[in-house]
Each structure stands twice: as C-alpha cells, then as structure tokens.
Amino acid sequence: MLDRQVKKILRQKVERGLLELRKLGIEQQLWEASRKGIDQPPTSVANHKSATDSDASS
C-alpha cells in the first residue's frame, strides 16, 4: 500500500498535469475523445479489435 506522502506527491502531479492541459486548451478535447471510445456500441469495439488483431498477425 502506498503511504500518505507518496499519494500526496502523485495527487499533486496529476493536478499539475490537468492544469497544464487546461492551459493548453486540450482538456475538453481529451475528455470528448475518451467519451467517444466509451460510448461506441459494443459491436464497433469488437469489430475494431478483430481488425487490429488480424493486422498484428500479418
């Protein structure tokens, strides 16, 4: 288990990273892109995975 000091440091790094994303104006774009992947129907995800798997075996 991580001790409190390590957790505090990690939390600060994440917060700084999010602040940088906001400053660059890409935080919202990343959230929207991540939601697109989650909101896709399961068949689309399965089709994408099988196409990727076949590409990797080539």
Image (cartoon, helix red, strand yellow):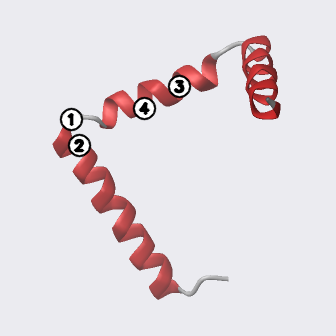
Q: Amino acid at mark 4?
A: Trp
**14, 50: nearer the viewer:** 50
**3, 42: nearer the viewer:** 42
**33, 3: nearer the viewer:** 33
Q: Tell me which corner region of the image, top left, top right, bottom left or bottom right, holds residue 29.
A: top left
Residue 34 located left or right of residue 19: right
The residue sitting at 72% across, 19% down in the picture is 48
Identify the secondary structure beneath mark 4: helix
Q: How many numbered dots are placed on residues in this image?
A: 4
Q: Amino acid at mark 2?
A: Arg
Badge 3 density bin: few <14, some 14–19, many ≥20, Cα 10 Å: few
Q: Residue 22, which numbered label?
A: 2
Q: Tell me which corner region of the image, top left, top right, bottom left or bottom right, holds residue 8.
A: bottom left
Identify the secondary structure beneath mark 1: loop
Are the residues at dot 3 and dot 4 in contact (C-beta closer than 8 Å)?
A: yes
The span from disc 3 to disc 1 (Cα, nearest Å) is 17 Å
Residue 41 located left or right of residue 9: right
User: Which residue in the protein does label 3 denote?
Assistant: 35
